[in-house]
Image (spheres, rainbow, N blue to C red):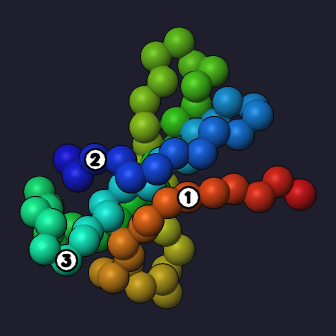
Amino acid sequence: ETGSEDIDILPNGLAFISSGLKYPGLMSFAPDKPGEIFLMDLNEDNPRAVELRISRGFDLASFNPHGISTYID
């Protein structure tokens, strides 16, 4: 609903997508909805984005993701 802001694809085909970026003065289609992170498995025949659950204690109300990157250890 709010569009994706960035995507990072791991070598194994998992894609992490950030969504919900809001800029002051820029129209938002869902101004009261917090940001989200989605996971998509590009190895599937019909991949679809699935919202990841964010841990308790995280300030979800102010989550406004701008970009995303992953670190592989």
Q: Are marks 1 and 2 in contact (CB under 8 Å)?
A: no
Q: For numbered disc 1, what is the local secondary structure? A: loop
Q: How many marks?
A: 3
- Kindly identify the amino acid type of the residue bearing the numbered disc 1: Ile
Give me the C-alpha separation between circle 1 and circle 3.
Answer: 20 Å
**Upstream in the sequence, badge 1 or badge 2?**
2
Nearest to the observer: residue 23 or residue 20: 23
Residue that carries the numbered disc 1 in the rendered image: 68
Name the image quarter holding residue 23.
bottom left
Q: Is residue 53 visible?
A: no
- Kindly identify the amino acid type of the residue bearing the numbered disc 2: Gly
Q: Residue at x 63, y 39 (%)?
A: 9
Examine the rendered structure and indicate whether residue 58 appears above or below residue 69: below
Give me the C-alpha separation between circle 3 and circle 2.
Answer: 17 Å
Residue lying farthest to the front in this orientation: 25
- Kindly identify the amino acid type of the residue bearing the numbered disc 3: Pro
Examine the rendered structure and indicate whether residue 71 appears above or below residue 6: below
Q: Position of residue 16 (x, y in %)?
A: 55, 47
Name the image quarter holding residue 73.
bottom right
Residue that carries the numbered disc 2 in the rendered image: 3
Residue lying farthest to the right in this orientation: 73
Q: Position of residue 32 (x, y in %)?
A: 15, 72
Q: Nearer the viewer, mark 1 or mark 3?
A: 3
- The crowding category of the residue bearing disc 1, from other C-alpha atoms within 10 Å (few below 14, some 14 to 19, many at least 20), is some
Q: Residue at x 26, y 68 (%)?
A: 22
Nearest to the observer: residue 7 or residue 23: 23
Mark sitting on residue 24:
3
Nearest to the observer: residue 23 or residue 64: 23
Examine the rendered structure and indicate whether residue 50 appears above or below residue 36: above
